[in-house]
Amino acid sequence: MHNEQSAMSRRRLLAAAGAVPLAAAASRALAQQAEGQPMPGNAQLPEPAGEKMRWAIVGLGSFAIGQVIPGFGDARQSRMTAFVSGNPEKARTLGERYGVTRLYSYDNFDRIASDEEIDCVYIVLPVGLHAEYTIRALKAGKHVLCEKPMASTVAECEAMIAAAGEANRQLGVAYRVHFEPANMEALRRIQAGEIGTMRHVQCDHGFSANPEFPPHAWRLTKTLGGGGSMYDIGVYGLNTSLMMLDEAPVEVSAVYSTPAGDPRFTEVEGGIDWRLRMPSGISVQGSSSYCYSPYASRQRYFGSTASIIMDPATTYYDNSLVMEGGGPRREIGTGNAIAQFGAQLDGFSEAARTNSPHRTPGEMGLRDMRIIAAMYESADNDGTAVRL
Ligand code: NDP
């Protein structure tokens, strides 16, 4: 009996002894499931909410609603806190949808000065209003990103830059192509010498303006449009071409291509064909029109060993990059064009937050406006070249 009991005790003891390591292993396994892991390599960390720059959008029109506002969905350093509009009902509707509670009108706009929830202001108004609202926002102590073209005249651009200097705030022009993946890739290839030496640039941009469509109607007036197609779609050809080159033009010539008798063009030109002469001897040749159909947005860079064709080149959603020469014709895949909107916002937010240079500063807008003014001067004088 004694022996039986001691044999059982021994078995229990052994079983119990065996159970201890089993339980320890089980709890170790559980602990391992809950163990922290190192930060993944190349982690893309969003900015903490409090560190995002806070933006007011001025002018809730087709571009603001269609592209600018959705662009905040992709932004990591930027968020919307205010809308400025002449249509309170539209502002309220959009505010409810996007969680934007601070709503201003054009009349009480200057009150943004005491609104600490606004760091940056994005001007998305007709061109003729850019200078006034940019300067008011700068005087209110805010950083300003202004839509293209920067303003109606060189003098307005200069006044905007002076206001930014006085306010010690950033001023940028919303040249979104500088943040667009296909154009960034073209720039990288050109700078890496993949087309050899640049020999010529050709660009054509246009669409058919419809005076019955409100966003086109103001573009056909001198006071709100500033000028004609060159003040609108033509700016892409000019600014994008110069982005790809390492030099600034020394001479400009242009002729109007407005169709005779077209009733749409009583105040502004319907089209303009232009040429820039660069110090290296090459030329950039462009056309801009409110009379093209279908929509045209093309850039072509002719190099000494290869060329790059972009057609379309500067659209919101879908730009194409093709290389010809130096091998078979090849389409180069690039990122999604829509990323340009969030990237542009974040580029400006970062410059404003860190007080560092912005990729498309007011000075670039002024440079382009000086060239555009020279184009009009040349076209007004039957294409006589204007030295810059
Ligand atoms: P819209 O006509 O669609 O919108 C302009 C908005 O400005 C209006 O909805 C209105 O907003 C406000 N506004 C204030 N005063 C006036 C006025 N007197 N007449 C008309 N509108 C007025 O134009 P877009 O959205 O097409 O263009 C706005 C700006 O964006 C322009 O500078 C344009 O060059 C630029 N743009 C840039 C593009 C790009 O790719 N970067 C593409 C398209 C445009 P509210 O009702 O809220 O007051």
Image (cartoon, rainbow, N blue to C red):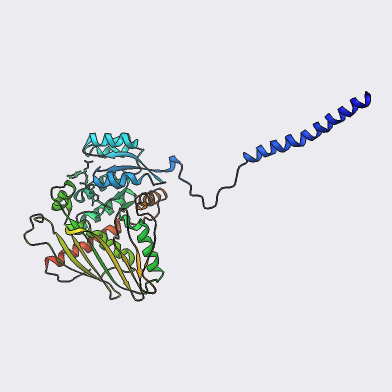
Whether 385 is drawn above or below 158: the answer is: below
On the question of residue 209 being in view, the answer is yes
- Image position of 95 (left or right of 378): right
Above or below — where is 163 with respect to 271?
above
Q: In this view of the protein, can residue 138 be seen by the observer?
A: no
Looking at this view, is 92 or 388 the one in front? 92
* Residue at the outermost top position: 1
> Could you tell me residue 165's position as x and y percent?
31, 52
What x and y, as percent, mark residue 134?
26, 48
- Check the picture and name the quadrant holding the N terminus: top right
Q: Quadrant of residue 233?
A: bottom left
User: Which percent across, then down, holds residue 171?
Assistant: 31, 52
Is residue 319 found left or right of 3 in the rendered image?
left
Residue 57: name its quadrant: top left
Q: Residue at x 37, y 44 (%)?
A: 73
Q: Quadrant of residue 158?
A: bottom left
Residue 379 or 356: which is nearer the viewer? 379
Q: Residue furthest left?
A: 261
* Quarter of the picture holding the C terminus: bottom left
Residue nearer the viewer, 332 or 205: 332
Q: Where's residue 189, x and y in %?
A: 39, 67
Q: 157 or 77, which is in the foreground?
A: 77
